[in-house]
Image: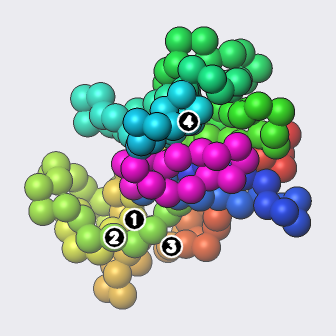
Amino acid sequence: MAYLWQLSTSHEWTAIDLAGGSLRLRGSAPGRGDHAGADDRASSVVLRRASDRGRDVWLLLVGRTERVRVNGLSVVLGITALDDRDEIRIRDEAPLFFTTERLAAIERYPSDGPRAMCPRCKQPIEGLVVRCPSCDLWYHQSEDLPCWTHVPHCACSQPTPLDTGFRWTPEAL
């Protein structure tokens, strides 16, 4: 899961999840929706998810009349791939920040997922699990097998409480 950080009117950073396939950016006020219509493509800025060998890649598509900078550099060809913690500036408005950070969450292990063993209990992964946001290892997380929350940190040092939140926010800048 990827997120886009924006500065609210009360000057606090909030994260918008990018669960859909696209997000249209209108200055510093992102909004859900399909890609730009024919009448406003010249002045549109859109985030689009693409995939590359099974992993998500996010592209920033910029209309020809827009002034957009990513990490201080102009998007001159109208398209750029985003990386974790990229700063996006549309015109002279407040910055937006893109992040690929995921939050730990309980989910059902995919039935077509690869065979894997829980690093904590050494049993086959199945049922309710948590995928470590940092190292991508799968851990059991059910009443019977609370492997993810059993200790305070994953082997990679990722905190294991389910309410940990983001490890990086734009406030760190």
Q: Tell me the residue that label 2 is attached to.
A: 107
Foreground disc of the pair 2, 4? 4
State the extent of the magenta-drawn residues as a range. Answer: 20-34
* Crowd around label 3: few <14 · some 14–19 · many ≥20 (10 Å): some
* Sequence-wise first label, 2 or 1: 2
Query: Residue at the spot x=34%, y=35% of the render?
Result: 50
Q: Secondary structure at mark 2?
A: strand
Which numbered disc flags the more N-terminal residue, 1 or 3? 1
Q: CA distance from mark 4 to mark 3?
A: 44 Å
Q: Amino acid at mark 4?
A: Ser
Q: What residue sits right under mark 1 in the picture? A: 130
Name the residue that disc number 4 marks.
44
Q: The residue under label 2 is which amino acid type?
A: Glu
Mark toward the viewer: 3 or 2: 2
Can residue 153 be seen at all in this image of the molecule? no
Q: Secondary structure at mark 1?
A: strand
Of 86 and 11, nearer the camera is 11
| Disc 3: which residue | 149
Label 1 is placed on what type of residue? Val
Name which residue type carries label 3: Thr
N-terminal label among 3 and 2:
2
Q: Closer to the camera: disc 2 or disc 1?
A: 2
Pick the residue in front: 73 or 52. Answer: 73
